[in-house]
Image (cartoon, helix red, strand yellow):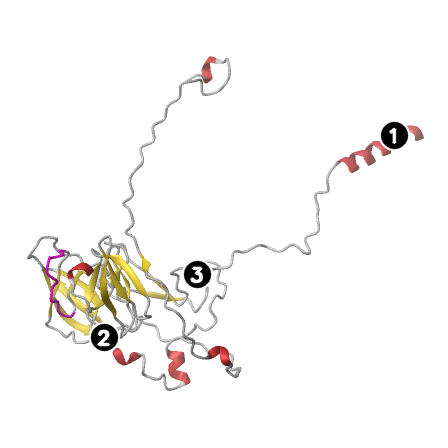
Amino acid sequence: MSSLARVIQKLSILDLKATTPIISSVRFKAKIVEKPQIGHGISFRRRVNYPEEYTVKPLNVTNLGGRDPVTGRLVVKGIGGGIKHKYHWIDWKRVGPKEEGKVQEEKVIKIMKDGCRTANIALVAHGDKLKYILATVNMKPGDIIKTSCYIPRIPVRANEGDAYPLGALPLGTQVHCVEKYPGFGGTYVHAAGTYATILRKAPNDHVVIMMPSKKEFSLPAISMCTVGRLSNIEYGSTPIGSAQRNRELGNRPRSGLWKRKTGIHGRKIRKPPPVKTIVAKPKDEIETIVLSCHRPFVKTNRSQFHY
């Protein structure tokens, strides 16, 4: 009886050695979480609740307070609080006729401020359609603005608020809401009081413009832009005035640590960067996939697997 018990005990010990342990230590294990990245066109100040179709009705906004809406993690420390504002949906695409001598005329209804951006906005009407655009310096209610996608042989003498391709305007014209790609919508120059300047023509039907940062971009000549300097010029030179006003703008207090500036904060004279050429994106072509099989799908002698 004792020998049988010893044999059973040895077998149980061998089984325990052969099996892998199921329970492991979880004390030092960390859960890997992807941290949200700052930039890449993502704003952590507010999230706009867009409807399916364009509307001039003010849209509701969800203030994020510097946190990621998915994980709830704090991404930007200096954002929080502030007065809630409705968002006015800007129509960034200015589309007009492509025939010579034809323009689309729109009337400015009113100029208003938008709490979600620095420049003023304008409500314009064409037929029975309303939309918002960015207002220029001298734009006022009752003005008639024109839009055309045709590039004539002689440059156009445009007024403020008119939208034309870059190749249709004379050199030295101040523009804003410049398209990066044709038909993409106004991408560059949205801030209050800013403008880009048309410098010169470039090969391959491109036009070189100088941004407010003094950088030069070479864009396609058929990219649309709006003529004039953006409104609310005094925004950049107006002091905030008080800490309470800064909180109303949605900015949280900083650390308060005073640090002496060293020589690294001085002015540096550097060579300007080279001209950045932007090429129009090719149209997406649907690739046709042809499926062909000249042999049995499965290497087997069974006929039910042969196609």
> N-terminal of the two: label 3 or label 1?
1
What amino acid is found at the position of numbered circle 3 in the picture? Answer: Pro
**Residue on which the image places disc 1:** 7
Task: Give residue 64's quadrant in the image.
Answer: bottom left
- Picture residue at 23% right of the left edge, 66% below the top: 199
SS at mark 1?
Answer: helix
Q: Position of residue 165 (x, y in %)?
A: 18, 59
In the rendered structure, does residue 159 fall within the stretch colored magenta? yes
**Residue shown at the point (50%, 63%) measured from the top left:** 73
Which of discs 2 and 3 lies nearer the camera? The answer is 2
Q: Which residue is mark 2?
A: 231
Question: Which stretch is magenta?
Answer: 150-160
- Quick check: 127 left or right of 271? left
Q: Position of residue 215 (x, y in %)?
A: 33, 67
Q: In 3D space, how far apart are the residues under numbered discs 3 and 1 (Cα atoms)?
A: 63 Å
| Quadrant (top left/top right/bottom left/bottom right) for the N terminus | top right
Distance from the alpha carbon under mark 1 to that under mark 2: 94 Å
* Contact flag, marks 2 and 3 (Cβ < 8 Å): no
Looking at the picture, does residue 134 appear above or below residue 14? below
- Placement of the C terminus among the 4 image quadrants: top left
Q: Secondary structure at mark 3?
A: loop
Between the residue at mark 2 and the residue at mark 3, the CA separation in whole angstroms equals 32 Å
Q: Which residue is mark 3?
A: 69
Q: Residues within 10 Å of mark 1 (few under 14, many from 20)?
A: few
Q: Quadrant of residue 55?
A: bottom left
305 lies left or right of 159: right
Tell me if label 3 and label 1 are in contact, CB under 8 Å. Answer: no
- Type of amino acid under label 2: Ser
